[in-house]
Amino acid sequence: MSDSSMHHADKAAFAAALEAQPVWDRIETGVDAFGLPENMLLHAGPAFASVNMIAKPILNSACVAAVYEGVATDFEQAEAMIRAGEIKLEPAQDHATVTPLAAVVSASMPLHRVVDANNSQNVIYSPINGGGRPAMRLGLRSQAVLDHIRWLNSDFRDLLESALTTPVDLLSIACESLRHGDDCHGRTPHATRVLMAALEQGINGGIRDTNMRDFIESSPSLFLNLWMAASKCIMMSASAIPGSSFVTAAGGNGVETGIQISALPGRWFSAAARPPDGRIDVDLPPERALPAIGDSAVVEGLGLGAMAINLAPEQLKGLGEFLPADYAERSARLLAGSHPQLAGLDCRVGLLARAAREHQQGPIIGLGMLDIEGDKGRLGGGIYDMPATVFNDAMTALEAAGEN
């Protein structure tokens, strides 16, 4: 989209987004940061219409989180409490939080705090990435997941806190990683190496624990949750601008996919989701793939991830056959413009609902595919083409509010 054709309100939102400087400055819990009740769990994407609509992988993770929190004594009791409404589930992004795939956030879980260095009121949270072990994001209900989340949120959290001696500039890490073949979503190994090397400098003697070292070296996605929070932080710097269609939220809950826009903060526009197009790596039929899930769609909502897949040769090689024919043109059509701190890179930022409606297409999103039954975890990876209907609905609401 050219600057001359951009709506004045979208120009204002884009300018505001370019001012954001997301940094990771500390770790807090949901209860301390924003008063998250112990009987409330936060999930990806828009709200579920009812407890009977909760996707099985998210239900599994919610049961694990309830036991972790001590609200339930076992997984069976946790599910009964969820179905009875004694434990409530709400969208994470409605609480300034982003969470990957089927992972849920509970009150006492440690969360990365990412703040805009130019606006201390713009704060976003994300859980610690579960890495290559039995991670909650995979939507499995097991003792192994519970054990790992306990270790992650204690021993590994302590390591991160001890190493975080100064705020970490996330935009500069993202910029460097994009120059080295990452896309900041499906592929983040370079960013993770840069992040962990910087953190290790804050630890006397470095990281000597073998288990900790093995976890870090086998978990190239550790940067992702931080960048999800950074992406959301940048998007939220453009929130509440009258008339603007700048996208400030994006995600899926395994049933529906949805967005929010600047001019109508807090209001989701959703549609039924379908599974990503991809290759299933296990011996299961395509019908076992869960529809689009995860708040990691904020990365593409910003403009990176699959929307900048040309910068990540390995991602392009692995997912290229599942990309729509016009994938290379989506960036120019749907995104507001270039970011000065990403200068020299072939990418743009700032998803606009106006542009999506004009071209009747949404962004392409790189997503992991989960088992719809919640038994096998990750099935593979693919490309999700977000439907134009959510953007059409957002623009209809914007015009009805007299903010066009």
Image (cartoon, rainbow, N blue to C red):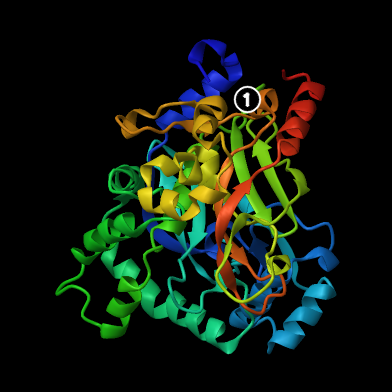
* Residue 382 on image: x %, y %: 56, 56
* Residue wearing tag 1: 355
Q: Is residue 58 above or below residue 92?
A: below
Tell me, yes or no, if residue 165 can be seen here: no
State which quarter of the image contains the C terminus: top right
Residue 47 image offset from top left, x and y in percent: 75, 55
Q: Is residue 394 above or below residue 258?
A: above
Residue farthest toward the top in the current orientation of the protein:
4
Residue displayed at 76% across by 37% down: 389
Please give left or right for residue 239 compared with residue 45 in the image. Answer: left
Q: Position of residue 388 (x, y in %)?
A: 71, 35
Q: Is residue 193 found left or right of 8 in the rendered image?
A: left
Q: Quadrant of residue 116?
A: top left
Q: Residue at x 28, y 63 (%)?
A: 196
Q: Is residue 171 left or right of residue 73?
A: left
Quadrant assignment, res 368: bottom right
Residue 375 shows up from this direction: yes
Q: How many marks?
A: 1
Q: Secondary structure at mark 1?
A: helix
| Residue 117 or residue 367, whichever sits in front | 367
Q: Which residue is painted at 53% across and 20% down in the image?
A: 1
Residues packed near mark 1 inside 10 Å, few (<14), some (14 to 19) or many (20 plus): many
* Three-letter code, disc 1: Ala
Q: Position of residue 324 (x, y in %)?
A: 58, 41
